[in-house]
Image: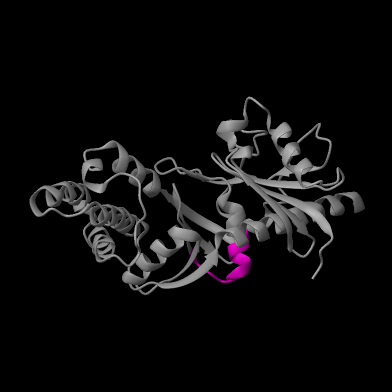
Amino acid sequence: MSTSPALIAVDWGTSSFRLWLMSSDGTVIAEHRSHEGMSEVARRGFGTVLESHLAALSIPDSLPVVICGMAGSRQGWVEAGYLETPADVTTIGANATVVSGAARPIIIIPGLAVRSISEPDVMRGEETQLLGAHLEMPGGELYCMPGTHSKWVRMDGAVVTGFETFMTGELFATINAGTILKHSTGGEGPVDAQDPAFLTGVRDGWTRPEKTTHHLFSIRAGHLLHDRGADENRARLSGLLIGAEFAGAGIQGGEQIGLVASGALQRLYHAALSECGVRVRDIDADAAVRRGLVEAWQGYENRNGDRKRA
C-alpha cells in the first residue's frame, strides 16, 4: 500500500469542506474538515481558503487538487457546467474544468443534468460519489443517495440513464422547525431507525403517499389527543417523508439498491428500505467520493496524456 502523497481530493459543498491527502492507490494519508462551505467563503475567496487548509497539512505546492461539489456551481469558484444524461460517469474527470491562474494544478468536476422540459434535474458532487459507488458495485442499476436533497439514480453499466431529486431532508428540517408540528416533535433531535413509529411512518408514506399531508397533521392531532411524545412524533415525521420519497422513486419491493450513505442517514434509509422489502447494498459515502475523486483525476490525466501524444 503506497503512502507517498500524490493528490489532494476535495469535496466542497454548500455548508461543508472536506479535504483528503491521497496516495496514488487511494490511501488516505491525512484529512481536514470544516464548515467552510460555499456559502461561507465567497468573501474570503476559494483559493485563499483552500491554501489555508493545504498549509495546515504542509502539503507541497507541486501536488494537484481535484474538487467536486458546489465549488463548481454558478455561484462557486469556477463554474464547471453539467454533462447531460445519458452520461458515462467514468468520463467526469476527462470533462473537468481547470482553475486558471492557480499556483498548482486544480480541476473541478462537472455535475450531471437531466434537461427535460417537464422535469429538469441537476446534481453536483453526487456524480463523483456515484463514480466511486459504481466501481464498488459494478452492474448496479439503481442507487439511492440520501441527503438534504436525496438522489435516486438509474444506471446501465457506467452510464447514468436518469435520476430524480427529492427534497426530503430539507422538508423534514423545515416542517420540524418551522410549522405547527414543531410543538409536537420538540424540534431538533435524533431519530431511532428501529423506532416502530418511524417504520410505521415509512410504510404509510410508501403505500399511501396521496395522504401524506393528512398524515402530517395527524402527528399534531395525536399529540393533542393521545399525548404522543416528541421522539415518537419526530420519528413518524421522518418515516412519512422517507416513505413518500420511496413511492415517488417507484420502489415496489424486491429490488436491489445501492445505498450510498453514512452515519445516521445510512441507518435510517437502510432500515426503511428493508422495511419495504428492498435488498440493500451499503456503500460508504465518504469512501465512494474519495474513490471517485481519485478515478476522476486519473481520467483527467489520461485525457491530457492522449492529447500530448497526439
| 93 in relation to 207, above or below | above
| 305 in relation to 182, above or below | below
Instruction: Please name whichever residue, 110 or 219, is drawn nearer the observer in this view of the structure.
Output: 219
Instruction: Please name whichever residue, 107 or 186, is drawn nearer the observer in this view of the structure.
Output: 186
- On the image, the x and y values in percent for residue 90 come to 67, 58
Q: Is residue 134 magenta?
A: yes
Q: Answer yes or no: is residue 306 visible.
A: yes
User: Residue drawn 54% across and 66% down?
Assistant: 283
Range drawn in magenta: 131-142
Q: Quadrant of residue 100?
A: top right
Q: Answer yes or no: is residue 18 visible.
A: no
Query: Is 232 placed left or right of 307 in the picture?
Result: left
**Which quarter shows the N terminus?**
bottom right
Query: Is 113 placed left or right of 229 in the picture?
Result: right
Q: Is residue 105 magenta?
A: no
| 155 in relation to 150, above or below | below
